[in-house]
Image: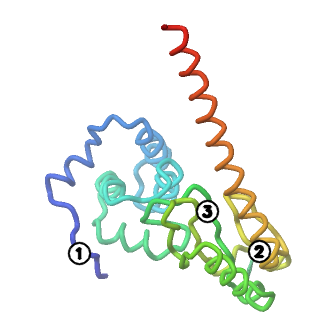
Amino acid sequence: MSVKTGLPSRARQRAAADHPSGDPRFSLIDRTLKRFSFEQDALIEVLHTAQEAFGYLSDDLLIYVAHQLKLPLSWVYGVATFYHFFTLTPQGEHNCIVCMGTACYVKRAAEIVAALQQEYCVNTGETTRDGSLSLSTARCLGSCGLAPVLVLDGEVLPRETPESTLIRVRERIVGSRSAAASQHGGNGAASNAAGAGEE
Ligand code: FES
């Protein structure tokens, strides 16, 4: 099995194994490891937990999991890259997975992907430059009767069209932007008030 080049040095492997960062998210991974008694067969479960905790599987996480399960790093990396539900790059604020399995494909799934790519200038498997949206595809999400299906921020959406998907994604992105803007506005008002009080 081939492994990408530029894997971390031994020193970095040791550091990741000890996770000196003290990041509490590692305890979630540790819990899953213990639940499965550090069985090597639990690799996928452990990777799932790691991705849920961190959002994506960084090199450090793969090294940590490989070390804890006493598996070759090349094996862990191979599994993480084989399954579409694992991602090795940081995800955007919103995440859209479009099913491109046969049932969805014949019901315009490719048009949904194309509409998103055009609207947000993003390729599948990538995140927009502003980090607002990650777009990816899946082979079959197991809900063929609801085709075409996509998953937006963890929510399964049935019988989508390019138009309905664009509206939904737009709403999500605009919604989070206005929430961030009002939060900044609130903070600004609070600091202005504090500044006035100091005079
Ligand atoms: S092909 Fe899309 S859910 Fe099965």
Report ligand 1 position as a quadrant. Answer: bottom right
Asked if the residues shown at circle 2 and circle 3 are in contact, with their CB atoms under 8 angstroms apart, the answer is no
**Dot 3 amino acid type:** Asn
Q: CA distance from mark 3 to mark 1?
A: 28 Å
Which is more N-terminal, label 3 or label 2?
A: 3
**Dot 1 amino acid type:** Thr
Check mark 2 vs ligand 1: CB closer than 8 Å? yes or no.
yes
Q: Position of residue 1 (x, y in %)?
A: 31, 82
| Secondary structure found at label 3 | strand
| Secondary structure found at label 1 | loop
Number of residues whose C-alpha sits closer than 10 Å to that of mark 1, classed few (under 14), some (14–19) or many (20 or more): few
Position of 170 relative to 185 (above/below): below
Q: Residue at x 35, y 55 (%)?
A: 69
Asked if the residues shown at circle 1 and circle 2 are in contact, with their CB atoms under 8 angstroms apart, the answer is no
Q: Nearer the viewer, residue 89 or 62?
A: 89
* The image quarter in which residue 98 lies: bottom right
Query: Pointer 1: what residue?
Result: 5
Which is more N-terminal, label 2 or label 1?
A: 1
- Kindly identify which numbered label has been placed on residue 95: 3
* The image quarter in which residue 10 lies: bottom left
* The image quarter in which residue 103 lies: bottom right
In the image, is 13 to the left or to the right of 134?
A: left
- Kindly identify which numbered label has been placed on residue 149: 2
Residue with the most extreme front position: 199
| Secondary structure found at label 2 | loop
Q: CA distance from mark 1 to mark 2?
A: 36 Å
**Dot 2 amino acid type:** Val
